[in-house]
Image (cartoon, helix red, strand yellow):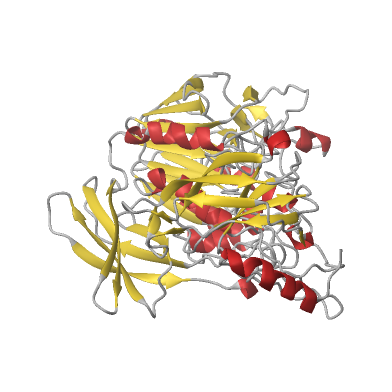
Amino acid sequence: MICSSHKMRMMMSGMWKSRGIFFSLLVLATFQLAMSDEHQPLSKVAIHKTTLALDERAYIKATPNVLGLTGQNTEWVTLQYSNPKPTVEDWIGVFSPANFSASTCPAENIWVNPPFLCSAPIKYQYANFSSSSYKSTGKASLKLQLINQRSDFSFALFTGGLTNPKLVAVSNKVSFINPNAPVYPRLAQGKTWNEMTVTWTSGYGISEAEPFVEWGPKGGNHVKSPAGTLTFDRNTMCGAPARTVGWRDPGYIHTSFLKELWPNREYIYKLGHRLFNGTVIWSEEYQFKAFPFPGQNSLQRVVIFGDMGKAEADGSNEFNNFQPGSLNTTKQIIKDLKDVDIVFHIGDLCYASGYISQWDQFTAQIEPIASTVPYMTASGNHERDWPGTGSFYGTLDSGGECGVLSQTMFYVPAENREKFWYSADYGMFKFCIANTELDWRKGSEQYKFIENCLASVDRQKQPWLIFLAHRVLGYSSAGFYVAEGSFEEPMGREDLQYLWQKYKVDIAMYGHVHNYERTCPVYQNICTNKEKHNYKGPLNGTIHVVVGGGGASLAEFAPINTKWSIFKDYDFGFVKLTAFDQSNLLFEYKKSSDGQVYDSFTISREYRDILACTVDSCPPTTLAS
């Protein structure tokens, strides 16, 4: 049913004011829909097509009304609801802000007006999820988990399924006691080995409060370090859905730099906002351990994975089961956190794909990890790619985010955050992190960075040289690569393999392909070492590892076996590197389901083994004495 704008507003004014929320919905006959991202469950909700089917007999009630009374930023809400005309397609949408019709979309062109309802839910669940009798009784209850996201919430009951939603009832408002509170700290290494950065999100702009971190060593004096503040608006987004139904105010993202840390010392910190009336709003207290100095000979443990995404503990948003391993990966790392020093998430972080609310959900999910150890990130296609924005690939995978969210929500020690390539020193490790969404080929700016990063390593101090990137620039038996006639990203290793060989990179790891695979030490498709599990002396090549099974739906292997592929696993998991000293490294692949080790190898060698010559890695020599 198509209604005029005036008639629709009159209907809503009379029917919704009694519920304490005024909505202004307009159903439009035409609307240019942005291409949906099949990886994002929220893209299945055709919210712009919503029509009114309000029924006075229907209701939805949420309890409690006020959340976070004891300071928590995550809490469960119970919904009680009824529909006199129930169907199996009825669903509950969670909206924030509560007045979800307040968001407006820019017109796609001068001939097509924007819809008035232009706010996707932050999550949803089917009405019969907890009650098989809903279809016959029309009544049910549901428990949903909410996180503090800088605004209030309301819950809406829809019929008509996800593709033709009809609004039946709207709930009361629910809110955290302080929706602006500082939340979800993310640690990262600064631009020097003895600097830690703390990034967090709040609802306080610089005109309302001064952000800072109070920190210091355990048992020592604490100091306050100021934080910078960033944000962005809808116009910063490059396209839909990020500019349209997926837009949600991101709040303010703050970063503070904790400098001149003493190596290996444990520090305490908490986030603060000093209001201009003198009141200070505090977060809870957190702690971290400072970095070892470069070359320090001590036990050092690194976790690496890609493509984890986010998932909901309450089971919402999961009708297509796209990220079933995400929670398990998160839980296993948390369980092992006392034995983890630093984490690298190498691209495809949360698969928000233009639905901005999902970044809050993701940072809340990883908070136990990222608030305790550095959480280093790389750029993936679902963070960066968008046509006409300079990305190497012209896909729609970022949902219009074009890198803005990943570059703002997480700090990386890059010279230019838009380029997102950088190096990181952690004790005996040197990491060179590439950005596969920008050109990496010979002659490019990034190629020069990669060579400089690899060439700058003092292998006597940092014997373990690791290359990280999102897309597979090395080797993979993924079905979609083989179907294209390659075992890599097109043009992936043609230029880079010479650098890996010349500078004797030990291990190169990638995401993008959602499975696990390990190669032999390899160069130009040839295994350079016949050993599979206990390497002694020179490797003579680089071991390539795909570790993209962090949580997103798995990718099939091609039905072909290559000589360079040693181990494959069609499952969710992550890699852990343990450097015992400058001569001994342990590599472990663990499944997310149980945390057990399913593949491993060791490298044992001396410094002279790193210096040893092999194909294409020998410097020029002379016959002169």
Q: In this view, does 229 lie to the left or right of 298?
A: right
Quarter occupied by the C terminus: top left
Q: In this view, does 283 lie to the left or right of 267?
A: right
Q: Is residue 566 left or right of residue 179?
A: right
Give the percent coordinates (x, y) of residue 94.
59, 53
Q: Which of 72 and 440 is in front in this view?
A: 72
Q: Which of 451 and 211 is in front in this view?
A: 211
Give the percent coordinates (x, y) of residue 149.
48, 59
Res. 549 in view: yes
Residue at the outermost front position: 57
Res. 419 in view: no
Give the percent coordinates (x, y) of residue 317.
63, 44
In this picture, is 440 found above or below 24? above
Quarter occupied by the N terminus: bottom right
Q: Nearer the viewer, residue 134 or 243?
A: 134
Give the percent coordinates (x, y) of residue 417.
52, 64
* Residue 411 found in image quarter: bottom left
What's the residue at 43%, 30% (across, down)?
609
What's the residue at 74%, 42% (across, down)?
86
What's the residue at 69%, 58% (across, down)?
399
Numbered-mark total: 0
